[in-house]
Image (cartoon, helix red, strand yellow):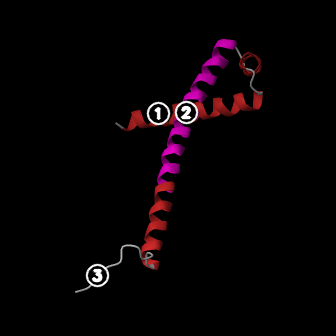
Amino acid sequence: MIVQNTDRTPSRKQRLQEKQRRQLAVVDTVDKAEVKVRKAEAELAVAVAEAVHVFGDERAASEGLDMPVKAVRRFVGIAALETAVAGADGADG
């Protein structure tokens, strides 16, 4: 009869498997967070583009939003890409 000692240290294989499991869990968490960030950035871009429309131009929107003109232009560019992608997706179906 073989008696297993439950207090023994894990084998190298078990340690490696546990390390890989933790690494994969972290990668999965980061991937999910990146998706959320991209979605939030796209929503912000649409809001900034709307602000440019409401304020009249990028400089006025920059002042009204207390955001650098460079950032406003970046978000307007992202919004334009989002609109183009959405238009292309709609044309495919």
* Number of dots carrying numbers: 3
Q: Residue at x 44, y 63 (%)?
A: 21
In the image, is residue 34 part of the stretch drawn in magenta? yes
Q: Magenta residues, as a range?
A: 27-55
- To which quarter of the image does residue 80 belong? top right
Say what amino acid the circle numbered 3 marks: Val
**Looking at the image, which residue sits at the far left?**
1
Q: Which residue is mark 2?
A: 40
- For marks 3 and 2, the one nearer the N-term is 3
Q: Residue at x 31, y 79 (%)?
A: 4
At mark 2, the secondary structure is helix
Please state the horizontal and vertical placement of residue 78, each as a whole percent of the image: 61, 34
The span from disc 3 to disc 2 (Cα, nearest Å) is 56 Å
Q: Which residue is mark 1?
A: 86
User: Which is in the foreground here, disc 3 or disc 1?
Assistant: 3
Please state the horizontal and vertical placement of residue 47, each as a whole percent of the image: 59, 22
Say what amino acid the circle numbered 1 marks: Ala
